[in-house]
Image (cartoon, coloured by chain):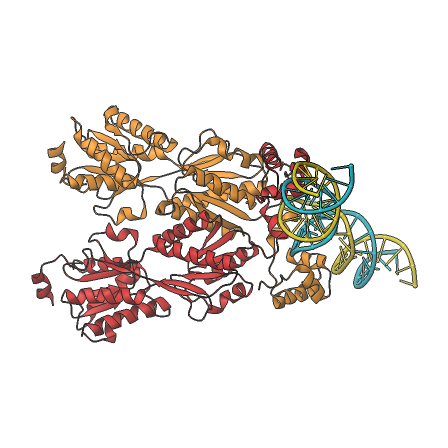
Chain colours: A red, B orange, C yellow, D cyan
Amino acid sequence: MTKPRVTVIDIAKAAGVSKSTVSLVLQGSSLVNEGTRSKVNVVMRELGYVYNRGAANLRQAGAKSRIIGVVVNDLTNSFFAELAVGVDMVVQSAGFVQFLSNTGESIDRQREVVASMREHGISGLIVSPARATDAADFKPLVAAGIPVVVVVRNLPGAKVSSIVSDNQAGMMSAVQHLAELGHKRIAFLGGFPDTAVFDDRLAGYRNGVEAAGLGYREELVIASAPSRAGGVEAIGKAIGLADRPTAAVCFNDAVAFGVCDGLRARRLEPGSDFAVVGFDDVIEAQAAVPALTTVSVDPQGIGRRGAQMLLKQINAGKAEAETVTTAVRLVVRESCGAGMSVKIKQDFA
Amino acid sequence: MTKPRVTVIDIAKAAGVSKSTVSLVLQGSSLVNEGTRSKVNVVMRELGYVYNRGAANLRQAGAKSRIIGVVVNDLTNSFFAELAVGVDMVVQSAGFVQFLSNTGESIDRQREVVASMREHGISGLIVSPARATDAADFKPLVAAGIPVVVVVRNLPGAKVSSIVSDNQAGMMSAVQHLAELGHKRIAFLGGFPDTAVFDDRLAGYRNGVEAAGLGYREELVIASAPSRAGGVEAIGKAIGLADRPTAAVCFNDAVAFGVCDGLRARRLEPGSDFAVVGFDDVIEAQAAVPALTTVSVDPQGIGRRGAQMLLKQINAGKAEAETVTTAVRLVVRESCGAGMSVKIKQDFA
DNA sequence: TTAAATATTTGGAACGTTCCAATTCTGTCA
DNA sequence: TGACAGAATTGGAACGTTCCAAATATTTAA
């Protein structure tokens, strides 16, 4: 059934050289004579030789497998799909191959997946950690000399490199924009308070309202699941407030979409009746109606950058933990009401 | 720098047993005494042992690596991301791990990626082939006893299993729906004619118009790239036709979105002024305005199903090439004008 | 108590590669 | 011609595991 494998010894025999020579050819060594090299190559093609990386890797103990592990927490979210594509680009062109897994926010699955990757001898790991991931979880990896780069969500205690977008500045610019449009009561909606990303975005919100001279009011921040459903829930509470807000910055785009849904359910039109701003600039943001004003973060860029960082560490042999935050930029579309006449906003304020 | 690896021999020494016994424990053999087993397990934990699958698989020649390769042609398209998630679900729960790569429609990259996967000893491959993939490309794989399942796009000549959605029936029901709404001139827009999927969908279109007694007219099928830009281009040509169509079925949702863009650019409102129907039901379809009427295909289901099929073949040891087509269903939303009054349509017809 | 049966453990020999040190070729120079 | 340098090649040994056949421990049956 399964054909006997063609090995380097078979090639050697058929080409009339030693297995060592074949091995040299395999690694593109300059030691081997041009004629021999091509002869060996021909024979390999004829016999349908397939390199056995497992065996190779076994011998070059400690040397690298050329596999990069990538772990994301939600591949169906186009944000992470883009990220993976970004990683794939640089990883492939560096001659590595990508091992991608999805945890679906399950910390157990994350553990399984990472363990499995380790068994397969990955030379590095890029991970967007599931919620509530323990900083210590990646300790063994780095102790074994396997570089780890954490992306999107940072892991405060862990001694690993990370690359996150500038959540604070992004949220601050969103608030600032709304303030410039004349809004006085701006809410912060959605997200789970136990995450580092939430903290950063909230801090940005706080800085924003304070800088605008509006003052930070606790009742205006309403947490919820970072999903569409969470957004519906959050806006419901916000509308119920005695001193009702006229605008909101949302934890992410999914929440923002939910907020729009919730507004419509109450016969309020997002954009004209209530300003909403998202975060992430997922692919659907510009096609939505009204088009979502949001903070754009370029996930593919993060992926590329993270991969570069990882490769650098792999090549360097030593993992200098380094943290970079990537710039973000507010994309003004319709949902913030920027295109509306001033009159409407004044009626409302 | 890199610590010396902890091997099964180290464990054996520390636990006072032989390496063979440790190996037995590793494989959960029932031959080993309960006491010994737990002692070994404890030691493994203490020393931080990591199983070396490379070595294992080297020995069990022909035996399987528990890696499943997944190759898709466009991960940024949420259709394929969903598909990958579907595969991941069943693959992971079967104790396999997924190796995912993106070809971006490049046939060269596909070749590279598949070769690399083979070197790593995948036990099976799920692939959505890049355009113009040669059926013979997967020949060596199956010859080596590695099961291959082709999804989404089928590969006519290849002797591999495949699972595609029922493109023909889907397109036919779309045409039928438009005919029932009173449309007489229905165009088929977008897609590259050199693909099997195109042929299937076009055949469905043809059956549909003929069954509705409208007659098949060649000038109403206008090919283009299967993208948003392609859609714009195709609708441009369609509008220019002497006997202008009043409705269109599109090769896929991306084309359909492009068609909507093109209509608007000509001051025609999709839905009320011109009916458009897509194919795939990508995630954006329901959030778009107007919400896209489209043929829903459940990519995640295809992924799951494909993975199951592959696992079955892996376990059976023999690859019985099997072809399944999955059912699709028309989702009526707004872009087909189904919600419009009959009057408007009559004005138009 | 002993033989037979069963349960457990164990030392090599693989698996396909790379590395090392050593060997065999080429010329080249005196 | 012989010696020498450089180029090219080569036979083990090793990597960490599993498998096999064989050895040893423990029970059971008589």
Residue B77 visible in rendering: yes
Question: In the rendered image of this protein, does residue B321 appear above or below residue B282?
Answer: above
Query: On the picture, is A11 further left or further right than B91?
Result: right
Q: Quadrant of the N terminus of chain B?
A: bottom right
* Residue B272 makes an appearance in the image: no
Residue at point 58%, 62% (across, down)? B2
- Residue B191, image x and y in percent? 31, 34
In the image, residue D6 lies at what x, y percent?
Answer: 64, 45
Decide which of A141, A246 is in the foreground and name it: A141
In the rendered image, residue D17, in percent from the top left (x then y), is placed at 66, 54
Q: Residue sitting at 32 percent across and 45 percent down?
A: B282
C24 or A275: which is nearer to us? C24
Q: Nearer the viewer, residue A25 or D1?
A: D1
Q: On the picture, is A250 further left or further right than A19?
A: left
In the foreground, A244 or B259: B259
How many numbered circles are shown? 0
Is B139 above or below relative to A282?
A: above
